[in-house]
Image (tube, rainbow, N blue to C red):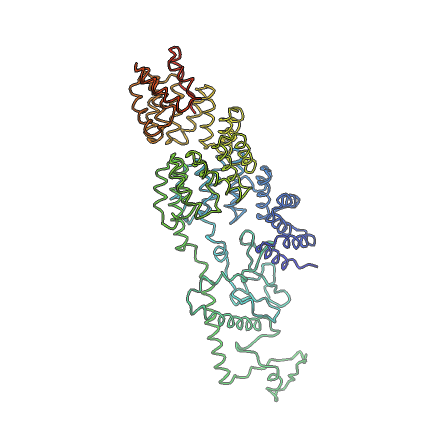
């Protein structure tokens, strides 16, 4: 017969030391011997950590589950295998019931349930579940970040605080366990025990540790050791009479008492405390489990002293005397030395009790330490900055990130967020500089490198982008970010087929990456495969409705098809998400101009230029619309500015030729058309003919690139 509890401890030890094969073998032996929910959960945990998700789901689905840990594991496996209905059934749909059933695991269960709701496009329920998770545990940063990414209005100053009425999740599982415990035993596990009594029974908890089903009288036969246990998997304090599966005795973890021994003298006195406590437990055992009552607090008289102490007694004192009229002899008065020793022992026991009491009571203080408060304060600052970035108020986000403590500001995550804010502002040079520093300090970090590759694509830095793509692919070929960088690299080199191949590979690795679908759609659009482009863009917005890049892509495809009304509708969707983007407003102005709304178009383009003064595209399109509106003189200022900042752009000279042709300056028009032809012989020849052809003077402007 296999003893269940020691094997559980060994299996958890193997898991903690990443020995998954050994853990699986032992767990399978245990489950074959004792087929129960506890052993199934242990075996399922081994399978899951070894990456055998299908086996975990099959095992748990064929087991009647009541443990919340097992239900949570089944839901996690079902979610990974895209069995969303099974995952939702395993967790439950009532948020309040989920919060009560899963205990300290409830915030994680609610976060998992929110992910299911989000995937199945029930975003209001997802937001409700995430808010519930944050109310239970304010340290759930991922829940806060998901709410911000969904566009939900959340106040970091309200979220990241400990509310006495709602905050039920312990700052640490350990502290919460101690808070739920009446007493904590304090025993050195290295001290051998030669008694049949469990070592974690102390004078303070003999009565409280006795199960309700036991008799009130304590005898050696029925006094079973009752251990305080904590779950290795979830840290949930067990309910009385719950299965002991996956539990480890609390006294095996020294963390329970080390935080309270802050004084060096107490740390040095630790062995003495342990020895004194062991002696005290031994005395308690003699007092409770002896065959007859004791009349003294001191040590029991030796057997030899009992046999030879009273020779003149009127009754037999033989050991095996079974006379019914047996009486007890009054104990002999101890000598002076014994009195001193007894007093000393009582004093030592008293000191030990006080020390033990302090050890037991100290951890039960509510978890309101300075470290937790400091962490919540930091989360508030980061939350404000991240919220601004999520709502694309990028200038304010950069300011807030730069106001946090220097050590946190220098961390790669914060630097990545600052670089991303510069990218959203179309400040590609600043973003690329920050990303480059991150690559130097953390060469194995891939977070944000897809944005970095896009910045290099906009800056037309072929060598740097090629080096980045090669490094990322060599680092991890199973990361979608690596293939996005490779796709951007070949897109910059105008190798469309290879770029599409790599973007498809990125989508294949991570089907839920909305940004990957958006980049794939843009590459399809450039390759003039409009149907595939629209499909990719729509997939991106179905994954993330706030992906303005995909909405912008749909608008540009419709603009290429001259479906200006549909283009205007979709570009407004993108602007609702990113109202501070000059590029989006520029596209809206083009759609309005094509629909004949010249006044609105000019106002929109004025706003675009004011938002992004350094963007040449906004000035170029404003000049083009001003020319169409019959204001060629006003267009000259923008075109001369563009000629200074982009002296080798053929379209600028072509548009200058059209403006001078409108103004009647034929010689200047011919000169600028010639310059445009020299810069781009293949692209402007047709445009020059169009400029001199009176029948095409009022044609619609060029399609946006």
Q: Is residue 350 above or below residue 623?
A: below
Q: Is residue 600 visible?
A: no
Q: Residue drawn at (45%, 31%), measured in percent from left and top?
A: 549
The one nearer the camera, 260 or 440, is 440
The quarter of the displayed image where residue 19 is located: bottom right
The one nearer the camera, 147 or 55, is 55
> What number of labels is visible?
0
The one nearer the camera, 626 or 295, is 626
Q: Is residue 647 visible?
A: yes
Pinpoint residue 188: horizontal percent, then vertical percent.
53, 67
**In what quadrant of the picture does the N terminus appear?**
bottom right
Residue reaching furthest to the bottom? 312
Pinpoint residue 52: horizontal percent, then vertical percent.
62, 46
In this rendering, position of residue 235 left or right of residue 694: right
Pinpoint residue 193: horizontal percent, then vertical percent.
59, 70
The one nearer the camera, 299 or 665, is 665
In this rendering, position of residue 184 left or right of residue 635: right
**In what quadrant of the picture does the C terminus appear?**
top left
Pinpoint residue 398: horizontal percent, then vertical percent.
36, 41
Q: Residue drawn at (43%, 58%), measured in percent from left and top?
A: 365
């Amino acid at each position: 017969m296999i003893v269940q509890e020691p094997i559980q401890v060994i299996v958890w030890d193997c898991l903690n030391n990443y020995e998954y094969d050994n853990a699986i073998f032992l767990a399978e032996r245990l489950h074959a011997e004792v087929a129960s929910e506890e052993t199934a959960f242990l075996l399922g945990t081994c399978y899951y950590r070894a990456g055998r998700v299908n086996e975990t789901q099959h095992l748990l689905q064929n087991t009647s589950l009541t443990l919340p840990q097992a239900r949570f594991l089944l839901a996690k496996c079902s979610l990974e295998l895209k069995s969303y209905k099974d995952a939702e059934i395993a967790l439950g749909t009532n948020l309040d019931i989920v919060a009560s059933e899963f205990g300290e695991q409830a915030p994680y269960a609610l976060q998992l349930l929110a992910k299911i709701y989000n995937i199945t496009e029930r975003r209001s329920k997802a937001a409700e579940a995430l808010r519930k998770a944050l109310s239970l545990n304010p340290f759930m940063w991922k829940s806060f970040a998901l709410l911000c990414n969904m566009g939900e209005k959340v106040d970091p100053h309200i979220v990241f605080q400990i509310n006495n009425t709602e905050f039920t999740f312990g700052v640490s599982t350990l502290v919460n366990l101690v808070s739920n415990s009446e007493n904590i035993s304090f025993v050195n596990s290295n001290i051998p025990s030669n008694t049949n009594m469990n070592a974690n029974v102390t004078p303070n908890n003999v009565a409280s540790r006795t199960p309700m089903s036991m008799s009130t009288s304590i005898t050696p036969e029925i006094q079973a050791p009752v251990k305080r246990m904590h779950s290795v998997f979830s840290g949930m304090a067990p309910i009385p009479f719950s299965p002991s599966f996956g539990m480890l005795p609390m006294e095996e973890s020294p963390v329970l008492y080390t935080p309270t021994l802050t004084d060096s003298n107490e740390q040095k006195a630790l062995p003495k405390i342990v020895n004194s406590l062991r002696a005290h437990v031994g005395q308690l055992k003699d007092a409770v489990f002896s065959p007859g009552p004791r009349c003294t607090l001191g040590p029991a008289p030796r057997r030899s002293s009992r046999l030879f102490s009273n020779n003149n007694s009127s009754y037999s004192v033989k050991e095996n005397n079974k006379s019914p009229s047996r009486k007890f002899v009054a104990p002999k008065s101890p000598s002076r030395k014994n009195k001193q020793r007894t007093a000393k022992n009582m004093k030592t026991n008293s000191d030990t009790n006080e020390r033990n009491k302090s050890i037991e009571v100290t951890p039960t203080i509510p978890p309101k330490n300075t470290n937790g408060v400091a962490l919540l304060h930091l989360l508030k600052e980061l939350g404000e900055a991240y919220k601004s970035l999520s709502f694309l108020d990028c200038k304010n986000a950069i300011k807030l990130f730069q106001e946090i403590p220097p050590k946190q500001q220098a961390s790669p995550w914060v630097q990545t967020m600052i670089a991303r804010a510069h990218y959203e502002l179309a400040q590609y040079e600043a973003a690329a500089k920050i990303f480059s520093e991150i690559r130097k300090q953390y060469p194995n970090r891939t977070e944000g490198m897809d944005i970095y590759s896009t910045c290099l694509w906009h800056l037309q830095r072929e060598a740097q982008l090629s080096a980045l793509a090669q490094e990322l692919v060599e680092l991890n070929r199973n990361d979608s970010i690596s293939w996005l960088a490779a796709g951007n690299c070949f897109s910059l080199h105008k190798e469309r087929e290879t770029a599409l191949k790599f973007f498809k590979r990125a989508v294949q690795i991570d089907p839920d990456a909305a940004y990957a679908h958006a980049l794939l759609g843009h590459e399809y659009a450039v390759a003039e495969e409009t149907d595939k482009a629209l499909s990719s863009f729509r997939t991106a917005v179905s994954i993330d409705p706030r992906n303005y890049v995909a909405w912008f892509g749909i608008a540009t495809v419709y603009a290429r098809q001259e479906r200006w009304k549909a283009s205007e509708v979709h570009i407004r969707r993108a602007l609702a998400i990113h109202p501070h983007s000059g590029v989006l407003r520029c596209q809206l102005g083009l759609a309005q101009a094509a629909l004949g709304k010249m006044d609105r178009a000019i106002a929109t383009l004025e706003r675009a230029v004011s938002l992004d003064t350094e963007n040449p595209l906004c000035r170029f399109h404003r000049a083009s619309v001003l020319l169409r509106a019959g204001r060629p003189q006003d267009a000259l200022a923008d075109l001369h500015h563009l000629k200074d900042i982009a002296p080798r752009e053929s379209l600028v000279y072509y548009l200058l030729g059209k403006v001078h042709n409108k103004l009647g300056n034929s010689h200047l028009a011919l000169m600028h058309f010639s310059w445009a032809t020299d810069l781009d012989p293949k692209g402007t020849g047709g445009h020059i003919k169009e400029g001199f052809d009176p029948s095409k003077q009022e044609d619609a402007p060029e399609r946006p690139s």
